[in-house]
Image (tube, helix red, strand yellow):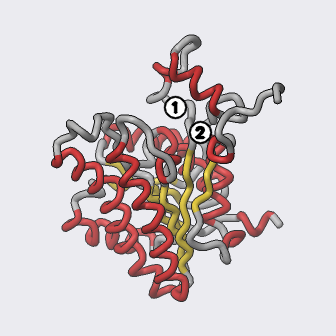
Amino acid sequence: MNSLFDLTGKVALVTGGHKGLGFAMARGLGEAGAKVIVNGRSEASVTRAVSELTQLDIDATQALFDVTAFDDLDSHIDEIVQAHGKIDILVNNAGIIQREPLATMPVNDFKNIIETDLTAPFAVAQSVARDMRKRGQGKIINICSMMSELGRDGVGAYAAAKGGLKMLTRNLATEWARDGIQVNAIGPGYFATDITAPIRVDGHPFNEFIINRTPAGRWGQPEELQGTAVFLASSASDFVNGQVVYVDGGILATIGKPSNEI
């Protein structure tokens, strides 16, 4: 059974893998045996992440490029393939969010979020899939969101992008399944990261909202995404395609946190 989840000999590219949930998934893939290529735009941040992974005896290296620099993507992916022989696993994690009401959001800001959170995953997947299709195998994991299913004030552009990414996942799976490529997605719920630290303090309204809205009664821990990432990257998921696995503590399963009162 363990061999189903063994990633030894696999090469994994994680975009935006230098911090937060991306770093947690990169670590999970590395601990399962994969060589991890950490992508990001900040050399200092990526170098620090690679150093941390290396200290954990994970084979890790960096790939500095902007996923929205579309004209340069093929050359960056080619460099990775030439240096490491292949890319077996792609985790499309890089993304941004901008909180602003749709009534006042400038069109250019809306376009920027769509470009980063939807167009870039398509472009990176398309580039990486060239070699995957030649070899007849590959795993692509897009990072969706609960906003792929739900609306919320102030994040309309992000939700539009993540909803589109859900359907992009299904359509890539539809077109590439016969090439031996599985394209799936993970939809994280609310996780305890450095970014959410200011709103996770006791008494903060949003902290109380998340705890009360989540059946598990707590925020997720970044390492709790690792198992899902390893599953979707491994041979254990060879007949799983076009799916979004929501790792959200049960939020999408219910209209509210279960109560002892009926």
From the top left corner, tell me how far across and down residue 48 is, in percent: 42, 38
The 10 Å Cα crowd at callout 2, few under 14, some 14 to 19, many 20 or more, is some
Quadrant into which the C terminus falls: top right
Residues at marks 1 and 2, CA–CA distance in whole angstroms? 7 Å
| Mark 2, residue position | 222
Closer to the camera in the image, 206 or 144 = 206
Q: Residue at x 19, y 67 (%)?
A: 71
Residue 230 position in % (x across, y down): 64, 58
Q: Residue at x 32, y 68 (%)?
A: 123
* Farthest-out residue, front: 262
Give the amino acid type for the residue marked by disc 1 in the picture: Thr
Taking 172 as reference, is 213 above or below it? above
Give the number of the disc on residue 193.
1
Q: Can residue 13 be seen from the camera position used here?
A: no
Task: Pick out the residue farthest to the top.
Answer: 203
Kindly state the secondary structure of the residue where label 2 is placed: helix
Quadrant location of residue 215?
Answer: top right
> Which quarter of the rendering shows the N terminus?
bottom right
Against 1, residue 100 (above or below) is: above
User: Which badge, 1 or 2, is on the more N-terminal residue?
Assistant: 1
Q: Nearer the viewer, residue 174 or 258?
A: 258
Residue at the location (61% across, 56% down)?
A: 229
In the visual, does 43 lie left or right of 136? Answer: left
Whether pointer 1 and pointer 2 mark residues with C-beta atoms closer than 8 Å, the reply is: yes
Q: Nearer the viewer, residue 60 or 200?
A: 200
Q: Which mark is residue 31?
A: none
Is residue 70 left or right of 215 when viewed as pictured? left
> Looking at the image, which is closer to me, 93 or 45?
93
